[in-house]
Image (cartoon, grey):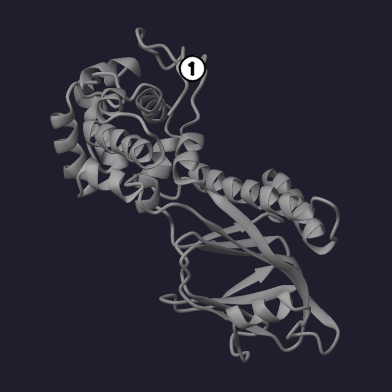
């Protein structure tokens, strides 16, 4: 929950589209889902090679540093040719195969990882033909936030093709170097660089505008992102659809329709979900009283808070607290 001393916080005034300088909803949500990422390995593979990745509990990614690879994904008719500079990510852990050729023999991904961790490369019997950087990213899944609902099954970034993506190409190269050269602080460096890479992938998806609806598109929409930011910064405020619309220079009806069309829920439903996310964290991780938590998320009584909490989360606030 944001500190009230933040320069972005103003509990009395409304922000117009031109006035608010502090809009970073993606950071709010990434903190809420507690994004963590790291890289498994960056290694050279010799011919023939192939990896079978099953459904994962976390997001996974591969970056082709050198050479090429074929990617086969469940549900897609044709394999995808990946070249140097390509980054392929699976935010929901979609099963897939990555290999030298579409018909290459495959080794389970967990076996490959285990062998590399024990300094045994399963594909090292000849001249190397590809260099792969592979890793994962994970996040809390019980946050009831639409970002998780709208995670794309696959992201394919061709950083060598678009000059505007030179920065992500440089980041991948820096990450590959750190992964292959053990130096003091390398483990932390790899974790941090991988997290930056994942955030950049989400940014790319936000700005790529492949669809006109969904939470990522709301984050890229100036007016919706400002409305979301107001909710995030002031969750205890008695927001109405009219006030939120006026805050972003839209009529009540236009704002309500636009918000629902893009985000997939009403503004007040989103407000309730954000409030209950905050409340859940406070119940699980603090010793604050039930009334204090209720007031911080806009409720004047424990009874009204408890009813709203159970409706969204599915259990009572007391049950969450007793689990701690």
Q: Residue at x 17, y 36 (%)?
A: 306
Q: Nearer the viewer, residue 139 or 44?
A: 139
Residue 162 visible in image:
no
Residue displayed at 41% across by 40% down: 285
**x 45%, y 79%: residue:** 77
Image quarter of residue 228: top left
Residue 275 in the image: above or below residue 251: below
**Residue closer to the observer: 200 or 322:** 322
Depth order, front residue of 238/317: 317
Residue 152's x, y, as percent? 43, 57
**Crowding at label 1, few (<14), some or many (≥20) Cα neighbours within 10 Å?**
some
* Circle count: 1
Which x, y percent locates residue 311? 16, 43
Instruction: For mark 1, give the secondary structure.
Output: loop
**Residue 198, image x, y percentages:** 59, 51
Q: Split into 4 quadrants, where in the image is the N terminus? A: top left
Quarter-of-image position of residue 121: bottom right
> Which residue is label 1 attached to?
8
* As drawn, 194 above or below 88: above
Q: Is residue 262 above or below residue 62?
A: above
Report whether 215 appears left or right of 315.
right
- Residue 253 seen in this snapshot: yes
Residue 320 on image: x %, y %:
28, 46
Closest to the observer, 302 or 182: 302
């Amino acid at each position: 929950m944001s500190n009230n001393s933040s320069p972005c916080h103003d509990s009395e005034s409304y922000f117009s589209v031109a006035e608010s300088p502090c809009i970073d909803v993606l950071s709010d949500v990434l903190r809420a889902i507690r994004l963590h990422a790291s890289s498994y390995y960056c290694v050279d593979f010799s011919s023939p090679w192939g990896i079978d990745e099953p459904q994962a509990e976390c997001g996974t990614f591969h970056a082709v540093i050198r050479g090429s690879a074929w990617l086969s994904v469940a549900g897609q008719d044709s394999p995808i040719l990946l070249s140097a500079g390509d980054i392929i990510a699976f935010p929901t852990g979609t099963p897939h195969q990555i290999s030298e050729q579409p018909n290459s023999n495959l080794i389970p991904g967990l076996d490959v990882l285990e062998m590399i961790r024990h300094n045994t490369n399963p594909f090292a019997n000849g001249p190397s033909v590809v260099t792969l950087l592979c890793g994962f990213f994970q996040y809390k899944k019980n946050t009831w936030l639409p970002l998780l609902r709208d995670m794309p099954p696959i992201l394919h970034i061709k950083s060598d093709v678009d000059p505007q993506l030179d920065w992500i190409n440089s980041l991948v190269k820096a990450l590959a170097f750190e992964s292959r050269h053990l130096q003091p602080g390398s483990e932390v460096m790899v974790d941090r660089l991988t997290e930056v890479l994942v955030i950049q992938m989400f940014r790319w998806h936000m700005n790529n505008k492949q669809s006109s609806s969904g939470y990522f598109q709301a984050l890229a929409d100036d007016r919706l992102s400002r409305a979301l930011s107001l909710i995030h910064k002031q969750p205890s405020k008695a927001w109405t659809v009219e006030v939120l619309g006026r805050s972003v220079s839209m009529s009540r009806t236009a704002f309500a329709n636009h918000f629902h069309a893009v985000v997939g829920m009403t503004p007040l439903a989103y407000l309730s979900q954000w409030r209950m996310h905050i409340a859940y964290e406070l119940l699980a991780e603090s010793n604050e009283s039930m009334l204090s938590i209720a007031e911080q998320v806009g409720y004047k009584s424990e009874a009204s808070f408890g009813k709203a909490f159970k409706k969204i989360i599915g259990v009572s606030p007391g049950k969450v607290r007793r689990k701690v």
